Amino acid sequence: MDLGPHAAFIWSAYGAVALVLAGLIAWLILDGRVQARRLADLSARGVTRRSESRAAAPRS
Amino acid sequence: MQTVTQRLANPTQFMDLSGRILPWLVGAAAAIIGYGLYLSFFVAPPDYQQGETVRIMYIHVPSAWLAMAAYTLIAISAFGLLVFRHPLADVSAKAAAPIGAAFTFIALVTGSLWGRPTWGTYWVWDARLTSVLILFFLYLGLIALRSSIEDETLAAKLTAILALVGIVMLPVIKFSVEWGNTLHQPASVLRLGGSTIDPSILKPLLVMALGFTVLFVALHVKAMRNEILRRRVKALQMAEVARAQAGQLAAAAE
C-alpha cells in the first residue's frame, strides 16, 4: 500500500490511536480483574453483602 | 412494570444486563471498526486536495465527536446525580471521564499529525485547537478533583458541579470554527444543508464513527462495571472493619 510522501504521518496517527485504545482496554480489563479478585477474597473470608448473606442463609 | 431506567437504577440488575450485553458490544465494535479500516485504506480514494492524508480524518473526526459526546454524557450524568439522585449517575460520570480524556487526547494527536502535512504546522493557538485542549484539561481536572477528595459523596457532588459548569466548552468548540480566525475547516458533515463531503469519503467516515461509538459504549459499560465492583469492595471492607471493631469492644466489655 503506497500512502505517498506523508505515509509516516498517517501511520503515526493510526499507531497513536491503536496505542491509546489498547492501553485503555488493557487498563479496564486489569482493573476489572483486580476488583473481582478483591471481592472474591472478601467473600472467602466470609465478608459478603447483606443480600448474599440472606440468600445463603437457610430459610426457616 | 419497571421502566428500563428504573431497572438500570439497580446496580445488581445493571451488572446482570451489562454482563450479557458487553460481549455483543465488543464484537460489534471490532466488526464495524474492521470494516471501517478496510473501507478507509482499500476502498476510499485519496482526496483531490489533501491526497492520502485524508485517511487520518477517519480516526480524527470520530475521536473528536466522541470527545464531545463523552463530556455530554458526563454532564447528563452529573445532572442525574444532582437533581434525580440516580444511583448509577455518579458511576456513569466517573467511568466516562478517563475514556473521554483518551478520545480527546487521540483527537489532539491525530489532528496535529494531520495538520503538519495539510497546514504546514503541528499546532496553532487558534480557537478550535485551543478549546479542545481546554476540554482535555477539563477532563483531567474532573479526574484530579475526584481523586483529591476522600469523601466519595462530596467528591461526586463537587465533580458534578464542575462537569455542569464545564459544559460551556461544548458550544465554544462547536462554533469556534465560525467565530474566530482558524486554520481548521468548518463543519462539513453535521451542518445545515447537508454534508459537503463526497460519498466515497463520507461512507468510511460514518462507518468508523459508528464503530468508535459502539467501542465507546462498550468501554463505558466495562468501566461502570469496574466502578460498581470497586464500590462493593470498599463497602465490604468498611463493614469488615466495623465488625472487627464491634468484636473488640464486646471482648473488652466482658
Image: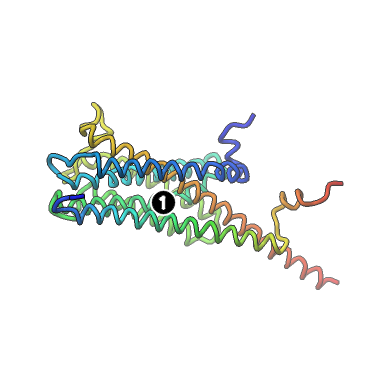
What residue appears at the point 64 percent right and 29 percent down from the top-left corner?
Answer: B1
Q: What is the number of callouts on the image?
A: 1
A45 vs B121, left or right, is: right
Of residues B148 and B30, which is closer to you in this image?
A: B30
What residue appears at the point 87 percent right and 46 percent down from the top-left corner?
Answer: A60
The answer to whether residue B172 shows anywhere in this view is no
What residue appears at the point 30 percent right and 43 percent down from the top-left corner?
Answer: B38
Q: Position of residue B175 (x, y in %)?
A: 25, 39
Q: Position of residue A39 (x, y in %)?
A: 63, 59
Quarter of the image where one finds residue B61: top left
Outermost residue to the front:
A1
Of residues B67 and A42, which is closer to you in this image?
A: A42
Q: Position of residue B106 (x, y in %)?
A: 31, 52
Q: Circle 1 marks a residue in which chain?
A: B
What residue appears at the point 15 percent right and 55 percent down from the top-left corner?
Answer: B121
Name the quarter where the C terminus of chain B is drawn. Answer: bottom right
Quarter of the image where one finds residue B123: bottom left
The answer to whether residue B122 shows anywhere in this view is yes
| Residue located beneath label 1 in the image | B99
Question: Which amino acid, mark 1?
Answer: Ile
SS at circle 1: helix
- Could you classify mark 1 by the number of other residues whose Cα lies within 10 Å: few (under 14), some (14-19), or many (20 or more)? many
B139 vs B39, left or right, is: right
Q: Position of residue B249 (x, y in %)?
A: 78, 69
Of residues B132 and B24, which is closer to you in this image?
A: B24
